[in-house]
Image: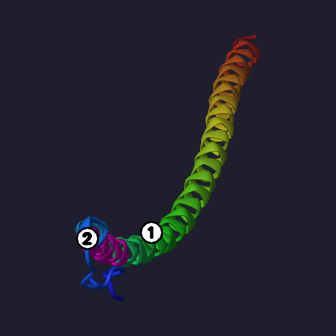
Amino acid sequence: MNSKTYESVQGIGKTGQELENFGTAQNQLNADILKELRIMQLQANMLTHHLKEAQEEISKLKEEQVKYILKLNQCKAQVDSLTHQLETKDSFQAEVEALRQEVGRLKLTARLNTNAIERLSHKEEES
């Protein structure tokens, strides 16, 4: 890419000199703009490269996120299972406690009945 747009042609008179000054200034401006454009192109290339790297990193992070979400769901399922088992265990323990109380009541009733039978038996023997 060439930044020069004016080629000096030696002319006679002031008009040629004015055009030459204008052309030289325009060529300098074009050269400066070309430098800035190349700098911007390099910056754009660097930004594009950084963007690609960032997109790759985001992609990797998304994959990790999916893995962690799956693992989290597995953990939640385990917690739910353990909670259900604990509830079942608590329910079972409540039933066992109720059975123990019933057995205790039956033992007490049996002891009282045995004592009553023994008293009646002693009364009959004494009579």
Question: Is residue 43 shown in magenta?
Answer: yes
- Residue 100: image location, x then y, percent: 62, 35
Question: Is residue 12 shown in magenta?
Answer: no
The reply, left or right, for residue 59 in relation to residue 88 is left
- Residue 13: image location, x then y, percent: 25, 70
Q: Which residue is mark 2?
A: 13
- Residue 76: image location, x then y, percent: 57, 55
Q: Which image quarter is the N terminus in?
A: bottom left
Q: How is the image coloured?
A: rainbow
Mark 2 packing: few (<14 Cα in 10 Å), some, or many (20+)? few
- Residue 12: image location, x then y, percent: 26, 77
Q: Secondary structure at mark 1?
A: helix
Mark in the foreground, 2 or 1: 2
Q: Which residue is at the front of the view, 42 or 121?
A: 42
Going by the numbered disc 1, the residue's amino acid type is Ile
The reply, left or right, for residue 2 in relation to residue 88 is left
104 w.r.t. 15: above or below:
above
Q: Which residue is mark 1?
A: 58
Numbered range of the magenta stretch: 27-45
9 w.r.t. 86: above or below:
below
Q: Mark 2 and 1 residues: CB-CB less than 8 Å, in contact?
A: no
Mark 1 packing: few (<14 Cα in 10 Å), some, or many (20+)? few
Residue depicted at x 52% and y 60%: 72
